[in-house]
Image (tube, rainbow, N blue to C red):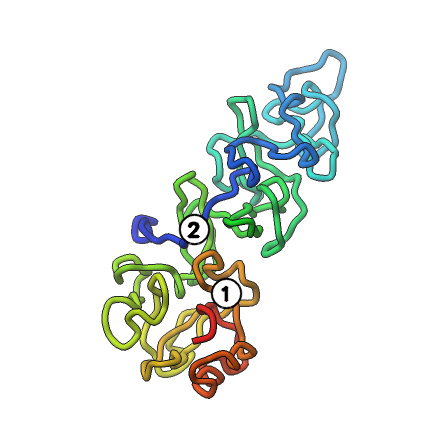
Amino acid sequence: MAFSMFARLQIPALLACLLSCSSGANNFGGRPDAGDAASDAADTGDAAGDTLLAVGSPCSGPSECVAGALCIGTVAGAFECMRRCDVAYVLCEAGSVCLPVMTQDAAICYTGGTANETESCQNNLDCGSGLLCFGASGQFYCQPACGEVDDCRADQMCLRLDSGAGLCRNTVGAACVSGAECAAGLVCSDDGGDLSGRLPGGYCTSSCQRDTDCPTDAVCRAVVGSAQRACLATCTHRSQCRFNGQYDCLDATVCAASTDPGACQAMFGEDSLCVPGPL
């Protein structure tokens, strides 16, 4: 599926933390303790009489790694030979993300982060293999990176940001103004009908009668204040939702503040859903 189908999909206020959330700079190593190895990274070359180190090996200098690799710092303060790559933010063969190196016309398949998916981060260097640091307004989480939709799980899309980085997001619950911005088989809640205006920023969904009518990671529920049943995105963590755009991963514990607690309880059931605050 061509990415152009989702070209206008946006998460309100979502920004890419491209290596330095605090400064906003698109460079390698935003903070001193993030393992900024730019001054030690250089083109590798044969060191006379020395055996060059393979990708993944600990290193201490720019001439120690095999050709096609650079000696780069990790978040733990160590240095490691990491493979060079050609296009920033695409996924490398082993699943790591290609990140640009500060002060150099080079990029590497970065393997120096340790934070897992949904864990908090300050910049891309914090995140483990295959993840990038995304968010805004002081809220940043490691999320799966992608170069194309095939890099994401079933019923996810590859949301392309202005930086060129890609983020895997669920198709149900994506922001929209019209159905043209939603994945195949989904419509926008603001296209008219009983749901219009009830889900801020629009919500890619579909009408349904039962959970099996919905894509993976979505359930069929009647939205509070509406008689219409629609597919709503399920979640286990707020980073899976539009957390910078009035949405969060909520459950029935919020229903005490709802305008219709009974309908609210029925909407959630036993699930956690990506929805705006109490409806």
Give the x, y percent position of residue 16: 48, 44
Residue 217 or 134: which is nearer the viewer?
A: 134
Q: Residue at x 40, y 54 (%)?
A: 12
Identify the residue position indicated by label 1 in the image: 248
Residue 198 or 10: which is nearer the viewer?
A: 198
Q: Is residue 216 visible?
A: no
Mark 2 surroundings: few (<14), some (14-19) or many (≥20) residues within 10 A: few
Q: Is residue 247 visible?
A: yes
SS at circle 2 = loop
Give the x, y percent position of residue 148: 41, 47
CB atoms at circles 1 and 2 under 8 Å apart? no
Asked if 268 appears above or below 104 in the picture, the reply is below
Q: Residue at x 55, y 52 (%)?
A: 139
Left or right: 180, with 218 as reference point: left
Identify the residue position indicated by label 2 in the image: 13
Give the x, y percent position of residue 128: 63, 46
SS at circle 1 = strand
Kind of residue at disc 1: Asp
Q: Residue at x 42, y 72 (%)?
A: 232
Kind of residue at disc 2: Ala
Q: Quadrant of the C terminus?
A: bottom left
Left or right: 9, with 61 as reference point: left
Instruction: Give the quadrant of residue 112.
Output: top right
The mark that comes first in sequence, 1 or 2, is 2
Asked if 166 appears above or below 118 in the picture, the reply is above
Give the x, y percent position of residue 98: 53, 36
Q: Residue at x 36, y 76 (%)?
A: 230
